Image (cartoon, rainbow, N blue to C red):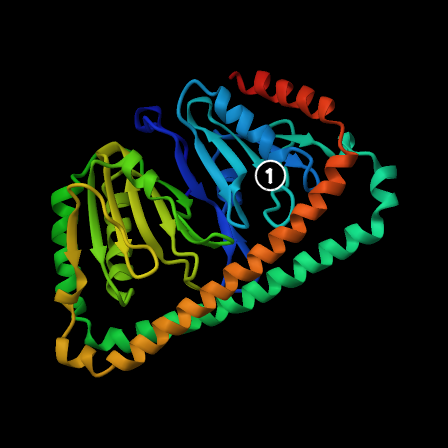
Amino acid sequence: MKGVFHMSNVHSQSLDFFMGALSPKGGFRGYFSHLNQQPDLWLYLIKAGPGCGKSTLMAKLAEKSPLPVERIHCSSDPDSLDGVVFPHKQAAILDATAPHVVEPDYPGAKQTVVNLFDTLSEATLYENRQQIRTLFDTCSALQKKANRCIRCASLLLEEMHSLAYPALDTQKLLGYVQRLGHRLLPTTDGTPVEHLRLLSAVTPKGELCWKNTVSAVANHVVVFEDCHGVAARLAMEQLRQQALHAGYEIYTCICPLSPEESPEHILIPALHLAFVTSNHWHPMEFTGQQTIHCTRFFEKEQISRHKNQLRLCQKAVDELLAQTSLYQRQAKENHDKLEVFYRSAANFEAVNAITQQVEKKIGL
C-alpha cells in the first residue's frame, strides 16, 4: 500500500526504528524500497564506501531538524544510522549502498543521489587494496555465519508455533481481538496508510527493541503477552487489517525472524495507541499498559503436553541468537578496521560541504 505522510499525524517526538535485518529467508532483508514507493516523499540516496561519513552526515541533518524525525538505525551497528525520515519536509535520506541498495528510478524527479565516492582518494585505497579486500571478504563470511544461525533460530520458532497452534482456540482469540479493535479503532473517513518498519532486531549488542518509540507514539499500550508467539501473530494481523479498514495511518513493525513477514507490533499515532507483542526475547513493560495474557486462549492440558519440547526449543533459540550476535560483533570489528582505511582516504571537508548542500535542499 503506497502511503504519504499526513501532517496531522506527525509524531511529537523523534522515533527510532530499523528498516532491515538479517532474514531467515537468506541474507539481509530490508524495507527501504517501501519509502521509495511513497509518491510524495523525496529521497536523498547516499552512495559511498564504509567510513566516509554517511552516518555522521545523517546524524547532523537529524540534529538540525526543528521538528521530530525518524531515525533509522543499522542492525549491524545500532549506534550508526541507515537513514533519517523528515515527515514535516516529506523527505528522507538513506544509505543506499549494499546491503540496503535503493536505486533512483526517477533521478532528479523524485530522488537525489548524494555521491560521496568522489570524496575518496582512489590512490590511497589502491595502496591498501589487499587488506581492504580481505576485510570485506571476512565481514561477508561472518555475516553469512550469522545468517545461518538466524535461519536455524527461525525454524525452531516455527516449530514452537506448530506445537502451540493446535492448542490455540482461534475462534475465541479472533473474536476477542475483533471486539477489542471495534472498541479502540473507530471508523474514520481517512485514507489508510501503512509504513513498514522493524522495532526490533538481532544486533551485535544482542536482541534490541526500540521500546522508547512505543512510548513516544502511544499513551495507551495494549500488550499481548505471548510466550509461544502464535496467538500474538494472529492478533496483530487482524488488528493491522482492522486499523487499515478503519482509515488509519499505521506503522506495521514486522518480526525480523518471521519468514512470512508477520506483523509483531502496530503503532497508530493518530490515536496515541500501540498494540505490541511481549515475549521472552523482548519483554514489554509500560506504565499503565493494558496486558492481555494469551495463555487464556490456549487449552492448558493440550499445551502442557509439549512443555518440555517448547522449553528446549526456546533454549536452543537463545543459544543461536547469542551466536548470531557474536558473529555480528566479529563482523563489526572487521568493518571498523575497514573504516580506518576509508577514513584515511576521505576528504571530510568535501563531505561537510555536501552535508550543507543537502541540508539546504531539504530546508532544515
Please name whichever residue, 141 or 162, is drawn nearer the observer in this view of the structure.
141
- Residue 82 drawn at (x, y percent): 55, 40
Relative horizontal placement of residue 81, taking residue 309 as reference (left or right): right
Give neighbour class at mark 1: few <14, some 14-19, many 20+ (Cα, 10 Å). many
Which quarter of the rendered picture does the N terminus lie within?
A: top left
Please name whichever residue, 265 or 214, is drawn nearer the observer in this view of the structure.
214
Tell me: residue 61, above or below residue 15: above
> Mark 1 = which residue?
95
Determine the image quadrant of residue 153: bottom left
- Residue 9 drawn at (x, y percent): 31, 28
| Residue 220 visible, this orientation | yes
| Residue 43 visible, this orientation | no
Residue plotted at (19% across, 47% down):
222
- Residue 157 drawn at (x, y percent): 37, 70
Identify the secondary structure beneath mark 1: strand
Tell me: residue 22, above or below residue 267: below
Residue plotted at (30% across, 42% down):
267
Residue plotted at (64% across, 27% down):
108
Residue plotted at (80% across, 52% down):
131
Relative horizontal placement of residue 214, taking residue 330 as reference (left or right): left
- Residue 125 drawn at (x, y percent): 82, 42
